[in-house]
Image (spheres, helix red, strand yellow):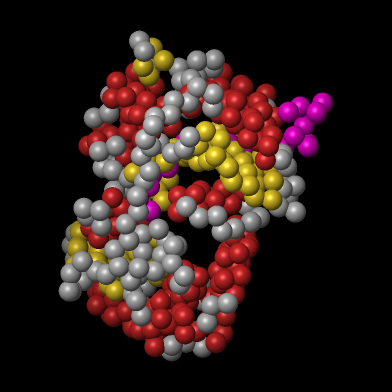
């Protein structure tokens, strides 16, 4: 039996508590939500890593790790996530469930207290963050941003998003950019930290055997002293229904690669998580390119051998679908034409009943797997919180089961190609 409770603990501080006996561990997370903005994205992304370096009571990573070891080897890890045009920064913790602890130890309260300590009582010097911690983690952040180009598949999608959504908040990467990251100072980061504590909506999440009242009491005590301003900065979400120009924009880039990366960005015609056709959008994506039995995989990759890989993905908060593929440089035109031809097949209903049912079963299976994995369940509920929704996975499963062929072709018909990104070799 699983019971989900939503409540507001403090102004702008919301808790989603999932009470279940399914797991031997508790998952606890705290996420501060900020509008995705190029000016603040890098500082926001750096913040949880600096906070995780030490607290007033545990001023370095060694003493903080020792405190976690005392909680049966618990963990608190920094988390930086992008949900549509919201940037989520905070921590995800995992701790042994009280039912499996010795001597009736109440781990939940201790874990909540330690997470509150990490968030609210950082190790400081001269009234701000320790410069050593900021400089070390700033260097790590710059390295992570620079390293994005090393994974060409994800890099091509990053570049597609930047080009397709240039001028929109969604075009900003969750880590920000290298120039902004390198310019962060300890003083500037402290100011940003204070602003987030005062103005950012806070999403708390718990999954474990404790009842919601106990969880609420533990987290309310842990966040005692959290400054709250009268006006919070709620992230906004804009969905652009159609492409920005009459003809798709083509962006090419040359790097030292032996395999081309072709990425296509589509506007979904307004279909997104807030709309009634969202379940049909999920099934369409699975049918088109979201599974190993999809049109793109079976035809473009397997049958015609035009791609090393080909798949589609949705950004449910933004009304965007992207196709990612790896191709021989000379197959650009053929691969692009066939990717679009398979989309046309979805639009006209040129797919078998088994394909539709296979896509439906894939979506249902993924949603049910979410209910059996604490990390995926936490990410699902964070997404729901960002969207202002409270629909549990099982209710979405029921809606997916009811999707018809006509609904799939209708949502496929809304897709409009906006931007094409092609990464090719320097000698090509």
410 in magenta: no
87 in magenta: yes
Compared to residue 356, the image places residue 9 above or below, namely above
Total numbered labels placed on residues in the image: 0
In-image side of 376 versus 424 (left or right): right
Q: Nearer the viewer, residue 146 or 17?
A: 17
Q: Nearer the viewer, residue 424 or 295?
A: 295
Residue extent of the magenta highlight:
84-106
In-image side of 350 versus 356 (left or right): left
Find the residue positioned furthest to the top: 126
Residue 359 drawn at (x, y percent): 53, 75
The residue located at (69%, 46%) in the rendering is 19
Residue 20 drawn at (x, y percent): 71, 48
Q: Nearer the viewer, residue 34 or 175?
A: 34
Compared to residue 337, the image places residue 55 above or below, namely above
The residue located at (35%, 10%) in the rendering is 126
Residue 190 drawn at (x, y percent): 34, 23
The residue located at (41%, 65%) in the rendering is 272
Q: Quadrant of the N terminus?
A: bottom right
Task: Tell me if I can see residue 302 in this picture.
Answer: no
Residue 345 drawn at (x, y percent): 39, 85
Find the residue positioned furthest to the right: 103
Q: Quadrant of the C terminus?
A: bottom left
Compared to residue 357, the image places residue 173 above or below, namely above
The residue located at (17%, 74%) in the rendering is 246
């Amino acid at each position: 039996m699983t019971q989900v409770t939503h409540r507001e603990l403090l102004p702008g501080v919301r808790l989603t508590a999932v009470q279940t006996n399914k797991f031997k561990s508790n998952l606890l997370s705290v996420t501060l939500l900020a509008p995705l903005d190029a000016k603040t994205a890098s500082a926001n992304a750096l913040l949880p890593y600096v906070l995780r370096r030490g607290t007033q009571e545990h001023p370095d990573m060694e003493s903080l790790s020792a405190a976690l070891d005392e909680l049966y080897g618990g963990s608190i890890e920094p988390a930086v996530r992008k949900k549509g045009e919201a940037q989520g920064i905070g921590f995800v913790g995992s701790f042994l469930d009280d039912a499996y602890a010795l001597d009736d130890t109440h781990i939940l309260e201790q874990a909540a207290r330690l997470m509150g300590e990490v968030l609210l009582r950082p190790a400081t010097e001269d009234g701000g963050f320790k410069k050593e911690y900021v400089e070390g983690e700033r260097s790590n952040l710059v390295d992570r941003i620079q390293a994005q180009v090393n994974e060409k598949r994800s890099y091509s999608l990053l570049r597609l998003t930047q080009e397709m959504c240039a001028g929109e908040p969604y075009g900003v990467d969750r880590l920000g950019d290298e120039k902004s990251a390198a310019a962060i100072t300890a003083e500037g980061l402290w100011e940003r930290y204070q602003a987030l504590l005062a103005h950012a909506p806070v999403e708390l999440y718990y999954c474990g055997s404790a009842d919601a009242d106990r969880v609420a009491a533990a987290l309310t005590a842990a966040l005692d002293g959290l400054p709250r301003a009268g006006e919070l900065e709620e992230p906004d979400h804009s969905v652009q229904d159609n492409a920005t120009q009459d003809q798709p924009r083509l962006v090419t880039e040359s790097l030292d690669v032996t395999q081309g990366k072709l990425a296509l960005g589509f506007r979904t015609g307004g279909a997104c998580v807030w709309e009634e056709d969202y379940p049909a959008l999920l099934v369409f994506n699975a049918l088109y390119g979201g599974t190993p039995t999809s049109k793109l995989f079976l035809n473009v990759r397997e049958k015609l051998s035009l791609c090393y890989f080909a798949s589609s993905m949705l950004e449910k908060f933004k009304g965007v679908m992207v196709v990612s593929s790896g191709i021989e440089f000379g197959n650009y035109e053929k691969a692009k034409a066939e990717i679009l031809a398979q989309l046309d097949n979805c639009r006209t209903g040129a797919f078998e009943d088994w394909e539709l049912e296979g896509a439906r079963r894939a979506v249902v299976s993924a949603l049910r797997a979410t209910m059996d994995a604490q990390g995926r369940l936490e990410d699902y509920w964070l997404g729901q919180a960002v969207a202002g929704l409270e629909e549990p996975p099982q209710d979405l499963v029921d809606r997916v089961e009811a999707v018809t062929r006509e609904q799939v072709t209708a949502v496929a018909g809304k897709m409009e190609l906006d931007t094409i990104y092609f990464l090719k070799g320097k000698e090509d």
